[in-house]
Every structure is written in structure tokens, then in C-alpha cells.
Amino acid sequence: MRKDVNLFIMNKKRVLVILCALIALLTIVFFIWNRNSGEVVITCKVMKGPVEVKIHTSGQLESENSENIILPAVLSGQNVRIYEIKITDLIEEGTVVDSGQYIATLDHKVIEEVLTAARLELEAAAAVVEDAKLDSNLNLSNYRDLIVNSKSDVEERKIVLAESVYESPSVIKKAEMDVNKAERKLTQDIKGLEMRKRQLGSQMERRKIDYNQKQQRVDDLLKLYDALIIKAPKPGMVIYAKDRFGIKIQIGSVLTPWSPIIATLPDMTKMISETYVNEIDISKIKVGQKVSLSIDAFPDKELKGDVISVANIGQPMPKSDSKVFEVNIRIHGSDRDLKPAMTTGNVIQTGSYSDKIYVPSEAVFETDSTKFVYVKKKEVVRQIVDTGDENEDYVIVNKGIAEGEVLLLNEPEKLDDIETKGWEIYDEQIRKLKENKQNNNQPAISAKADTVRNDAKGKKTER
């Protein structure tokens, strides 16, 4: 009995040794074959089931509604003529303030210099008005003296005419002419006085207008000087504004009437995530789409939201040729922990499909004209496919392959020996493209598109 047990153990060891040797031999053959062929094949299976298409972005929390703390309105007045002013003091960002509480101080020195110059101009204008009054009185007094003299002359001429009643007709005629001449001069002097009054009155009015403008400027500058201490219009948390270069306002920043915002007081109960989506994915983003959000500062928080706006015009990314579009996401509910400028992770759900054929993105190859996959059967086949929506990992395939088929994830080396199938899918795509172009009144598609059969790098099969 003991002998049989020993024999069984020896046979078992022999079998194990033989199996190990076979495995080693197969491994060596496999590596030698791969070394000779120089190709490693990675495959996957075509899957079918529910697919969710999501776009992942990062964003920044902002308040949907906020109250702006701006420069004094009087600074925009036409009389002030101050086009920029510096911030000399500013409370710390994030400070919670009450209504009427101190926010910032603007540069008093600039206003003082301008106010001094304006007061000198006002004094000069007042002197001009006073000189004009004296000149007007003097001119009108002279005109009035002329009228008095003209009246006296008329009276004298009339007396001469009355005394010449017994004189010769020629003397009487001359006396009458002298009276008429004196009366005409009197009439001219009276009209001249009226015209001079209007002229001097117009000059005086212009000088008064100039004086009033300078007085108004001094008054506006005094109002501005009193308003250089900026206070909060309502309770809230102070968030610094940004200038046109995207730099936050700070002590020393220069503001203008055209860019007057110093800071904002956000409504913390209504928050949005401001994010940017690249131009490749922006066509998938629609208002109303559901969004899941995470907060970098609070990894355990899970928030929900929806897309409320999508920009129509893109903007270039810094140091890049690509463009992005601004997308705003409203966060449902409110949370006291949320603060402006916190970073968010946004997952926008752009599509949900219950039963679709889908494959890994790496399994789909493309040229300028079409997309295809490599199907592993007895021989590898290049199969043209009609693709649909896609997410970061998978692509939905509408036509061309079936569930369970095996696809290559890497492109084979000997492409010239691979047969291409699915030309009917390609022809249908070209037909639809032509129809769309004709419906949109665009030029017909070029015959150059038919050269896709050459782009496929495979043997054309008879259809």
C-alpha cells in the first residue's frame, strides 16, 4: 500500500514537470513568434447596453445676482472732467460688511488739485462778469447821453423853424430839412441804444453761463470730494471686482467712469458655476441639461444643477489656438459653505441611451472622409461604421458591427492586405451629406470625396 502511494506521488510530480515544461515551451514559442512578427494585438469586444454621454469640466463659483460697489455717480458728470482715479485704501476681500459700512477710499489728492484749479477759473470768470457789467453800464450811459443830445438838437431845430416863418422860402426849407435830419438822428440813436442793449445783454449772458458752468464744476468737485469714502450699499461679503485684463482690483488700482466697479456684494443664496467648454463639445451643450457638481474644497459634497446659459461666441484660450465657450450652471438650493471663486468639478449630462451598440474610443479609426474599425475574424477586416454620440471613453456605433464582435484597439501593420467592407454605409453618408448641402444652398460636394476608397488603404471589394 505504501509502495502504491509513493508511485502515485512520483507520477504526479512527473506530470507537473511535463506541464511546466510545456508551458515554458509555449511561452518561448509565443515570444519568438511575436519577436519575429513584431506585432502585439490588443482586442476588445463590441458591447450593447445603456450609455450615458457626459462632459467633464472645471468651473468657478460665482453669485448669480450681486450688488456692485461702484465709483460715485458724480464722477461721470460732464463738468468734473476726471477720467481716472486711484484706490488708496480697500478693506480685505471676504470681509462681511453691513449696510453703510466702510469699503474703500479714493485718491483725495487728485480731486484737491483739480478743485484748486477749478476755483481759480471760477474767480477769473467772476471777474470777467464784473468787468462786463461795468463795460455795459458805461456803454449804455454814453448811448443815453447821445439820445439826450439828439432830443435837444431836435428841439433847437424846431425853434429855428418856428422863428423862420417870416423868412424866405429857401430859409424855411432849410430849417425844415434840419429838423428832419435831427429827428432821423434821434431815431437812429434810440435804435442804436436798443441794439447795444441786446448786444451787451448777449455778451453778459454768455459770461454768466460760463461762470455758472465753472460754479457747477466746483460744486460737483466738492460733492465728489465728499464721496471719496466708499460705503456698502447693503449687507454682504466683499468680493473684489476684476479689471478688463482679468486682474483683481486692489490698493493702487486705477478706475475710470467706463470701468467703475470696485467690488461686489454677491447673493450667497443663489450660486452658479462659471465654466468653459471647448469648441468640439459645445454643440452638445443645451440649456436645461442636468449637471452633477463637486467642490474641491469639500470633496464629500455632491450638488445638483442645470445649464442656464451657453455663450454664442467663443473666446481664445491663453497661449493656444483653440477656443472655448462660456457655460453657466445654476446650483440647486443653497449651502452656507459655498463661497465665490471656489473651484467646481462639473459633469454635464448631454445624452442618455438605454440600449446601444458601443465600443471603446480607441477602437475607432478615421480618415478625413470616414470612420472605421478593425474586426478580428479569421482574417482582420476593415469595417466602415456609422458612429453616433460619444463620451470620454466610448463611441456609439449605429451601423457596421454587432454585439460580441472582437475589435482591434491598435492598427495592424500590414494594412495593404486588409479587406475593406461597408461601402454601402459610406455611400449613404455621402448621399445625406449632399442632401444637406443642397437643402442649405451650399455648393455640391466635390467628387474628391469618392477617393475615400483610396484613403482606406485596403482592397476594394465588389459590392
Image: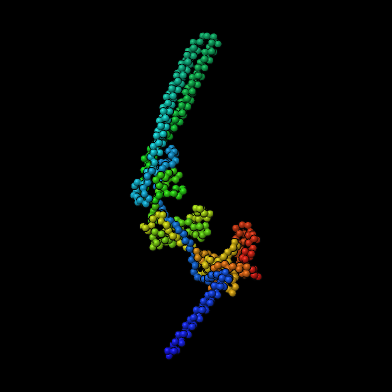
**Quarter of image, res 344:** bottom left
Percent position of residue 425, x then y: 60, 67
Quarter of the image for the N terminus: give it.
bottom left
Q: Residue at image x 44%, y 87%?
A: 6
Relative horizontal placement of residue 139, taking residue 449 as reference (left or right): left
**Quarter of image, res 382:** bottom right
Q: Residue at image x 56%, y 73%?
A: 32
Percent position of residue 156, x then y: 47, 14
Q: Residue at image x 50%, y 79%?
A: 20
Quarter of the image for the C terminus: give it.
bottom right
Position of residue 153 relative to residue 27, above or below, is: above
**Quarter of image, res 62:** bottom left
Position of residue 290 relative to residue 83, above or below, is: below
Of residues 314 and 140, the one drawn nearer to the viewer in this rendering: 314
On the question of residue 362 being in view, the answer is yes
Percent position of residue 295, x then y: 41, 59
Percent position of residue 316, x then y: 51, 53
